[in-house]
Structure formats: C-alpha cells, structure tokens
Image (cartoon, rainbow, N blue to C red):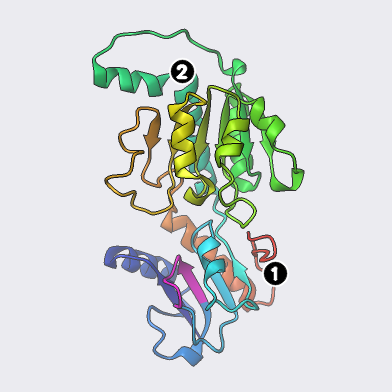
Amino acid sequence: MSILLAGEFDAAERAQWFDLLRAALPEETLVTEPTDAAAIDIAIVANPPAGALRGLPKLRLIQSLWAGVDRLLADDSVPPEVPLARMVDPAMNEAMAETALWAVLSLQRDFVDYAVQQRDGRWLPHPQRRADEVRVAVLGLGQMGRAVVRRLDANGYRVAGWSTREGQLDNLLAASDIVLNLLPLTPATRGLFDARRLAAMRRGASLVNLARGAHVVDADLLAALDAGQLRHAVLDVFHREPLSADHPFWAHPRVTVLPHVAAQTDARSAAAIAAANVRRWRAGEPVANLVDRSRGY
C-alpha cells in the first residue's frame, strides 16, 4: 500500500514535504500522484483541491498537515466514513501564542496608533496602560487557544476564555477591551462577527482575528470601525487569500493586515507528527487528534 501527498503546494514546498515525510517514514511508499489509486490507503494533505481524494477505493486514513480542516469537511468528495486527523503541533501553538501576545501588546501600548502617527509625521505620546488594566477575551479553547491564554496570563493581562460549548457570548464581549478569535470555522461560527455581534462589543474595543476570514462580515467590521464602535482590528485571515489589492482593509488606518502568518506550519515538526499518526494507524492504535465531523473540528 502507499501514501498520497496532496495539497496546494508550489514545486519547492512539495519537494520539501516529500523529502521530510520520506525521511520520517522510510518504510512507506510515498507518492504525489494517484496513478495507482487502488494502492493508496492513506492521504497526507494540505488543503488539497476539491476532488483530489475522489476515486481512492482503499483510502482508510486522512492526515491533515494544517490545523484547520474546514475546507476538507466542505469537500463532498472526501469520504465521510474515513477518519480525518488534524495537525496539532506544539510549535504552531507557541507561534500562535507569540502572535497573540504581539497583537495584544500592540493594542495595549498603542503601537498600532503610533504606526499611523509615523506615516503622518506626528509626535504624540499616549498615556501608558498597564497589562492588568486590559481585559482580553480569547474565543476558542483548543490547544492553540489554551496556549494563548497561558501566554497572556503570564504577561499580566486579565484573560477570560470562551468556547462554543459555553453558550452566551455577549456579556463577555461587552466586558472585554480586546477580543481575540481562535474559534474553528463551523456553520455555527461562520459570520460570527456581524453587525449585531460587533455592536455587542464594548465601545472602543479591538478585534484580533487569527482563525478564519469567514468568521467576520467584512462590511460590518468596516462600518463598526468607521463609526468608532471598534477602535482597531488586527486581521491575519480573510475570505479570499491573498487579500485583493483593492480591498479596503489595506488602506484603513484602524486595520492591521497580516498575510496569514500568525502560526505557520513548521514542516519539520509537522512531518514528524504526521508520521507518528501513520505508525499508530498501521499498528492498530488510536490515531491522535481525530476530527469530530459532527462538530466540524
């Protein structure tokens, strides 16, 4: 049997992943094209194009190299009965915690405003807030969310975590200076930050979205920023990526745009984690980080 490596890679990325996985799984046959579809029983994937896993009759395990699996779950060619494991990498968790700390610190200390002042040539010191005066809501308490909570708490912020299992969200939004989104994208969380939810946030609060672009209704966010309901938005993810050159986010003085870099997959550690899961499955042992399709993550 063999393992199919499939994803939206450029040539260099594909070669890197192939070499790392082959080194981590020397006993396996690794292929990048399903020329012998009946021989493929495992797929290791990174946001593969829709339909890439169609016509694999012996497929028994799908291992994602990305933490998010919403695109895979939306692809009706992915067999629903085949176990799907998402990537949970401690290196990615720490990278996300670093980005979250940078974003919160930048908002606490007004560094986002100083960047605008620099472009305008204005010298204007602001009053300095302490970390323990800033209330941060972290939405999403998976492994990344918990890593973010620990990092922010260690730096003195007043942190409250929330998950979709907890129900009521508006009271937390109304009490928070910064709302940091790390929720998985599911039908229940798509468009979560719409006009109603943004209006429920504390006036002058900031939004940090490091999860999925589809969590935010762009037009509603821009309206909330322009009206002064929100102070600033730090955005790492968007409905369409790359973000189009004419999108209003680029030039908006109250928006910080990142090119989906909050927590990039480290191919070295991720390849080792994927290989360990393959070995568990081959040995008949429980596979780590299986997706609950009913919950969407």
Residue for badge 2: 109
Please tell me whether mark 1 or mark 2 is closer to you in this view. 2
Foreground of the two, 292 or 277: 292
- Residue at 49% x, 62% y: name it: 65
Q: How many marks?
A: 2
What is the distance, in whole Å, between disc 1 and disc 2 at their CAs?
46 Å
| Coordinates of residue 52 in the picture (x, y in percent) | 44, 77
Residue for badge 1: 286
| Coordinates of residue 194 in the picture (x, y in percent) | 55, 42
Task: Tell me the number on the disc at residue 34.
Answer: none
| Coordinates of residue 81 in the picture (x, y in percent) | 65, 78
For the question of whether residue 274 can be seen, the reply is yes
Q: Which secondary structure, mark 1?
A: loop
Q: Is residue 289 above or below residue 192?
A: below
- Residue at 54% x, 67% y: name it: 74
Q: Which is more N-terminal, label 2 or label 1?
A: 2
Residue 48 is covered by the magenta coloring: yes
Foreground of the two, 270 or 183: 183
Type of amino acid at the residue the image marks with label 2? Arg
Residue 297 is covered by the magenta coloring: no
Q: Is residue 257 above or below residue 59?
A: above
Foreground of the two, 213 or 158: 213
- Residue at 60% x, 15% y: name it: 133
Type of amino acid at the residue the image marks with label 1? Pro
Q: Which secondary structure, mark 2?
A: loop
Instruction: Give left or right: position of 172 versus 227.
Output: right
Q: Which residues are magenta?
A: 43-51
For the question of whether residue 102 can be seen, the reply is no
Q: Is residue 31 above or below residue 212?
A: below
- Residue at 60% x, 47% y: name it: 183
